[in-house]
Amino acid sequence: MFDKILIANRGEIACRVIKTARKMGIKTVAVYSDADKHALHVEMADEAVHIGPPAANQSYIVIDKIMDAIKQTGAQAVHPGYGFLSENPKFALALEAAGVAFIGPPVKAIEAMGDKITSKKIAQEANVSTVPGYMGLIGDADEAVKISGEIGYPVMIKASAGGGGKGMRIAWNDEEAREGFQSSKNEAANSFGDDRIFIEKFVTQPRHIEIQVLCDAHGNGVYLHERECSIQRRNQKVVEEAPSPFLDPETRKAMGEQSVALAKAVGYASAGTVEFIVDGDRNFYFLEMNTRLQVEHPVTELITGIDLVEQMIRVANGEPLSITQDDLKINGWAIENRLYAEDPYRGFLPSIGRLTRYRPPAEGPLGAGIVRNDTGVFEGGEISMYYDPMIAKLCTWAPTRLEAIEVMRNALDSFEVEGIGHNLPFVAAVMDHPKFIAGEMTTAFIEEEYPEGFEGVTLAEAELKRVAAAAAAMNRVAEIRRTRVTGRLGNHERRVGSDWVVSVQGAQFETSIDADHDGATVSFADGSKLRVEGNWTPGDNLARMTVDAVPLVLKVDKITQGFRLRTRGADLKVNVRSPRQAELSALMIEKLPPDTSRLLLCPMPGLIVKINVEVGQEVQEGQALCTIEAMKMENILRAERKGVVAKINAGPGDSLAVDEVIMEFE
């Protein structure tokens, strides 16, 4: 077995590999850029080597720099993680030439299946059903428009060397095909150093289901069942689960056996994933094979008990698989939510900054299941604009799907993240969505269910009432603390009133509190009562309560006359006032936000790539105004309405902060 391996990656996947290597008694080497000098993976590894500036194309994907780090440390093998160099045959060849083991598949398999165009041709030759498309190289935007028209809109424009949603666009007409082709080429060049593009038919109402395979160099291969990855945003997976709620045993077996046969056909040896589009009749179509470890591999590990990273290391060491297909049963259900540094209230645009608070739920047992959190950040760390915005993968396991969802809900409510925009409220909302609960989702789920974007969660009245009861009880505790801090004498609890008016989400609840040693009974004007118990004390950021014996987890911030409470994806301003305060508050004039309708504001920290208009130009609704790059993704900002450009305040190459004015309109 290897004594030392180098991880040619960063963030949560580097930390993930280090954990398994440590378990196996193998020493690890981390590599890091200037931006990652204090990163978690650097701290966790036994050794660390600096490899250059923050930009990935000057550090993490520079093969010579990785090879130098290997020479400096004497690493015997390299795990590439995913992204970066993980599917780069030149890197695998460089390692082979240096006598260093690549913890991944053979070079020929990477070349055959790592390239989307080549893999589709091989699949077609093997009589595997594939999505219609144009597999040849496309020279320019005009050719892309012509091909798209011949295939028939909508089409998917994809980077041949792409992954993780980078270099992918859906086009519904000629204009979008032209814009999408250029943006895909730019993203592909920046992220992978390869700007080749192909186009295929975009299948409507599809489900994205993938098969995990594992092969060795001795001709053995198994499939570790499937993952459902249909909930995606901008072609990037957000929620994954294993198994799929849609497949039946016959389809699962057929997809698994076909995936293993395809892997064996190219001499595959390592962990890999064969991705399919599955229609409503369970017909499946080959999309691509990812010749690396997938981001969502933890859910497969949770339902099979197999450590995929360990298996990859053992296969790279020349060992035969110790498991057979008969050993691989499905045990329970697992769900993964990806935590992204992006603001769901701003169209999921990237967010950067310092994590002023980062407290994931404890890993291990929770309720009926188990919590796992793969992360690469820590409280006080910086989220950089240079890399992918994913900062953690929260996973839960339970015996059944509904139990796994419930464990996930409680884990999300317990996950504290402050200092940056993040998508926790959104994934919490998905966990409560009727279609997700029923398992009835397609890759168009987010577009169909949130067509105007995510604007937060509106809780049902019954849940609001539970929150109001908890807030009233918490306010009583805070008021008792306040009277003690002021140094007043006498019976403090008698000084705190029992009648309070709770205002939340447009509703108003008149409450009366009857407290005892174990909690409080909150009575409402309609005669109903709720029993609230918990150990929250003023200053705690998390309140673990029960309301009528049902758990309620709240993230808590103190505001004037109440609290900011967050739960189940809802961000609530909860005012708790005395009856007289509530009466006077109703007379207050509401302060309106400033009018920014004539300004184009930068929605995220990023770099201006292109300005599409000029001063004095009339623009139409939907017209492209400028392009901003952040976290390796290009974002086109469009006009919300017809207008005339009065002033342009920024140009290509300018780095802007959130809400900086890009241009003004008459």
Image: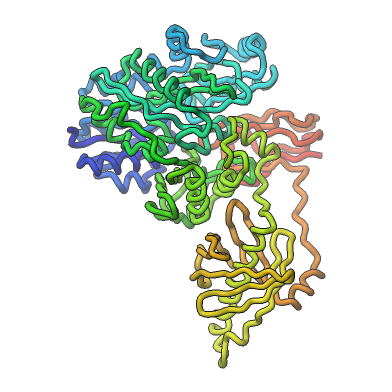
Quarter location, residue 500: bottom right
Q: Is residue 2 visible?
A: yes
Most foreground residue, 56 or 330: 330
Considering only vertical position in the picture, is 337 above or below 253? below
Q: Position of residue 432 (x, y in %)?
A: 59, 47
Q: Give the position of the N terminus as an image quadrant.
A: top left
Q: Nearer the viewer, residue 191 or 58?
A: 191
Residue situated in front as seen by the camera: 108 or 34: 108
Q: What is the tally of numbered marks visible in this picture?
A: 0
Q: In this image, 622 relative to 155: left or right?
A: right
Across and down, in percent, residue 20 comes to 28, 41
Position above or below: 592 against 651: below
Residue that sits furthest to the bottom in the current view: 490
Q: Does 443 appear above or below 501?
A: above
Q: Is residue 647 left or right of residue 533?
A: right
> Could you tell me residue 651's position as x and y percent?
63, 34
Quadrant of the image occupied by residue 30: top left
> In this rendering, does residue 64 appear at all?
no
Q: Horizontal placement of 40 versus 483: left or right? A: left
Going by the image, does 408 lie left or right of 620?
left
Q: Quadrant of the C terminus?
A: top right
Instruction: Please give the name of the residue rendered at 43% of the width and 35% of the height, measured from the top-left corner.
Output: 295
Name the residue: 55% across, 25% down.
168
Who's the residue at 75% across and 40% down the image?
Answer: 664
Could you tell me residue 533's position as x and y percent?
Answer: 53, 70
Instruction: State the residue lying farthest toward the top.
Output: 125
Task: Give the colour scheme shown.
Answer: rainbow
